[in-house]
Amino acid sequence: MNYIQPFKIKILLLSIIFLVLSSCAIQSYEMKEFDKSYRLYEKAIRWQDYDLMLGFHKNATKKELSESRRKKLKQFRVSGYHILFTTIDPSEQSATQVVEVKYYNKDYNVERDMTITNKWEWNEQIERWELANPFPDFR
């Protein structure tokens, strides 16, 4: 009988430890959406889907992508997009992501790079992440 009690206690302790560890691994809805958002934005910038990119920028309008700007953007190709680091606010309502974008100008065959600090904000009303910084400026 004495053998059964310690066995039950061990099972109980192992169950508690398992529950605690598994609850730590659960990601919040906002963080899952953040992962989706920044990955989709990365694909959009790599594939030059400027309309999709613009949709991520807070307060952005279609006027920002005028016909002349679209024509100018066609001369650039993104050759690399590397996330240098990501910082997430403890409240999980904002995040800062520093990325390095490598691109080349097809007209001059020159590769350049720029470092962008993306400031992501969770919009509670529409339940999605938005970029607070302006549309990237390729030069």
Image (cartoon, rainbow, N blue to C red):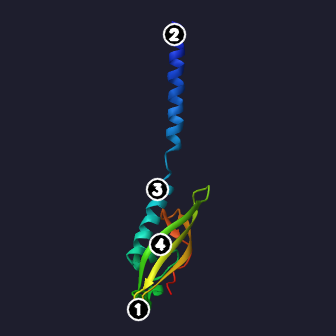
Q: Could you tell me how far apart the alpha carbons at marks 4 and 2 are, in whole angstroms?
A: 61 Å
Q: Depth-wise, is mark 3 or mark 2 nearer the camera?
A: 2
Please name the residue that numbered disc 2 is placed on. Answer: 3
Residue 50: image quadrant is bottom left
Q: Could you tell me how far apart the alpha carbons at marks 3 and 2 are, in whole angstroms?
A: 45 Å
Label 4: which secondary element: helix
Q: Residues within 10 Å of mark 1 (few under 14, many from 20)?
A: few
Q: Compare marks 3 and 4 and give the one earlier in the sequence.
A: 3
Q: Compare marks 3 and 2 and give the one earlier in the sequence.
A: 2
Name the kind of residue labelled 1 in the image. Answer: Asp
Please name the residue that numbered disc 1 is placed on. Answer: 107
Q: Position of residue 82 (x, y in %)?
A: 49, 68
Please name the residue that numbered disc 3 is placed on. Answer: 32
Whether tag 2 and tag 1 are in contact, CB under 8 A, the answer is no
Name the kind of residue labelled 4 in the image. Answer: Phe
Name the kind of residue labelled 2 in the image. Answer: Tyr
Whether tag 3 and tag 2 are in contact, CB under 8 A, the answer is no
Q: Could you tell me how far apart the alpha carbons at marks 3 and 4 are, in whole angstroms?
A: 16 Å
Label 3: which secondary element: helix
Q: Residues within 10 Å of mark 4 (few under 14, many from 20)?
A: many
Q: Could you tell me how far apart the alpha carbons at marks 4 and 1 are, in whole angstroms?
A: 28 Å
- Identify which residue is drawn at 43% across, 86% down: 73
Residue that extends furthest to the top in the rendered view of this protein = 1
Q: Position of residue 39 (x, y in %)?
A: 43, 65
Q: Compare marks 4 and 2 and give the one earlier in the sequence.
A: 2
